């Protein structure tokens, strides 16, 4: 009997194959193309021509690269628009499912940056990041050269770590928090776990013992604790000094008692990069939060809408995106090709296997 491959499996295999192609083809920068893979309906390979076909956006950015101030006027396509056009797969039965997803941007040398889709989505964080393919220099438009076919911009970031050059892949992923729904209801404690120095739980007294911050949002003065400080100072997030900007490959998932979850990249919280003043509030106008909100609530002051305001907080779980291993990806790609070949041949044909031509792998360059 002929075996039918589920469409979801085919999408996964297709994305993996495209990702493998990106790793091999772009192993040495500068890049000439990049791929869009993962949780999208239409995985694709993007080139200069496809980027130029989108509405061009011009953007002047100021940031620090090492100790050197940089000013660049970039021309490019919207990062969010490119992802949105790829057809991000969401579950319509899950409230704001888009906020539970993130994208891993990987350069040709393996340097990677995590961006939450919530920070990019125009309805929430509305970051205007570009896939820059040209730069205005002295009144003339010049193509990017050493930066490859596309460079991600991060307007407003003080430092240039999220300006990822020689883009090779954008991989859309969903979070997998271990903390699920507890049936809803008011909370009195939440846990911080995952890739942290030590798993810790916080009740109201523990939060009040930390350095407070007060911000007025929508006419209400909320008092709480900086989300960044809570994670990195009160709890601690380990960082691998051998990996450039290791924290930019991490994210945190905030979960409410009803199972509602939202992802934040650590890059958007880090004062050296996104610097968003998101915090865990426990007072509103000087009094405890309403019972329906729970004792602690994530407040995201700069978002357009409040979908990332997680009430009845029960968990903050930190995750780290693994460093890409080129050799592993090659073996995975070979296994995928072999499996697909067996499926197409019914698993019994003695036809010779197709030879795969693999270009030599060369090291690339880190983005600033």
Image: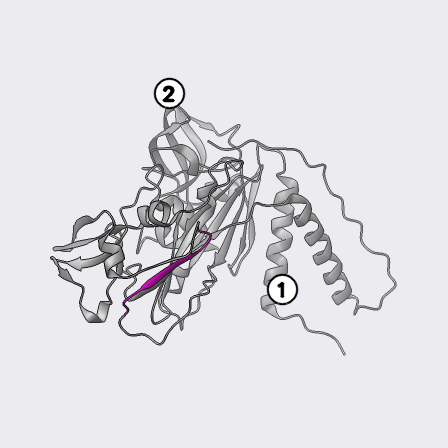
* Residue 188 visible in rendering: yes
Residue bounds of the magenta highlight? 187-195
Query: What residue does disc 1 label?
Result: 10
- Residue 218 at x, y = what percent? 15, 55
* Residue 81 visible in rendering: no
**First of labels 2, 1 by sequence position:** 1
Q: Residue at x 65, y 44 (%)?
A: 326
In the figure, is residue 292 to the left or right of 319?
left
Query: What residue does disc 2 label?
Result: 138
Query: Quadrant of the rendered structure where residue 109 is?
Result: top right
Looking at the rendered structure, the secondary structure element under dot 1 is: helix
Residue at the extreme bottom: 1
For marks 2 and 1, give the CA distance. 48 Å
Q: Residue at x 21, y 49 (%)?
A: 212
Do the CB atoms of the residues marked 2 and 1 lie less than 8 Å apart? no
Q: Which mark is residue 88?
A: none
- Residue 227 at x, y = what percent? 31, 50
Coloration of the structure image: one colour
Query: Quadrant of the rendered structure where residue 341 is?
Result: bottom right
- Above or below for 69 versus 92: above
């Amino acid at each position: 009997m002929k075996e039918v491959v589920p469409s979801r499996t085919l999408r996964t295999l297709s994305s993996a194959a495209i990702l493998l192609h990106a790793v091999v083809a772009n192993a040495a920068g500068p890049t000439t193309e990049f791929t869009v893979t993962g949780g999208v309906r239409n995985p694709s390979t993007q080139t200069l021509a496809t980027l130029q076909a989108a509405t061009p956006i011009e953007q002047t950015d100021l940031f620090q690269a090492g100790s050197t101030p940089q000013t660049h006027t970039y021309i490019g396509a919207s990062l969010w628009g490119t992802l949105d056009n790829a057809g991000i797969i969401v579950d319509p039965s899950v409230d704001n499912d888009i906020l539970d997803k993130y994208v891993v941007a990987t350069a040709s040398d393996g340097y990677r940056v995590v961006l939450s889709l919530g920070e990019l989505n125009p309805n929430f964080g509305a970051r205007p990041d570009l896939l820059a393919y040209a730069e205005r220099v002295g009144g003339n438009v010049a193509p990017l050269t050493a930066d490859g076919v596309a460079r991600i911009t991060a307007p407003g970031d003080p430092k240039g770590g999220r300006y990822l050059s020689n883009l090779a892949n954008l991989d859309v992923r969903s979070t997998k928090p271990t903390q699920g729904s507890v049936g809803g209801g008011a909370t009195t404690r939440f846990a911080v776990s995952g890739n942290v120095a030590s798993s810790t739980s916080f009740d109201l007294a523990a939060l009040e013992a930390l350095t407070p911050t007060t911000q007025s949002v929508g006419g209400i003065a909320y008092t709480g604790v900086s989300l960044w400080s809570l994670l990195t100072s009160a709890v601690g997030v380990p960082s691998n000094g051998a990996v450039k900007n290791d924290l930019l490959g991490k994210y945190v998932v905030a979960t409410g008692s009803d199972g509602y979850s939202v992802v934040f990249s650590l890059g958007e919280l880090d004062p050296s990069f996104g610097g968003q003043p998101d915090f865990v509030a426990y007072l509103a106008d000087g009094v405890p939060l309403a019972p329906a909100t729970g004792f602690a609530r994530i407040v995201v002051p700069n978002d357009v809408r409040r979908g990332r305001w997680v009430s009845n907080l029960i968990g903050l779980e930190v995750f780290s995106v693994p460093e890409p291993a080129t050799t592993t990806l090659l073996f995975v790609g070979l296994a995928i090709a072999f499996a697909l070949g067996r499926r197409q041949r019914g698993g019994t044909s003695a036809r010779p296997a197709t030879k795969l031509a693999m270009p030599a792998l060369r090291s690339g360059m880190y983005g600033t």
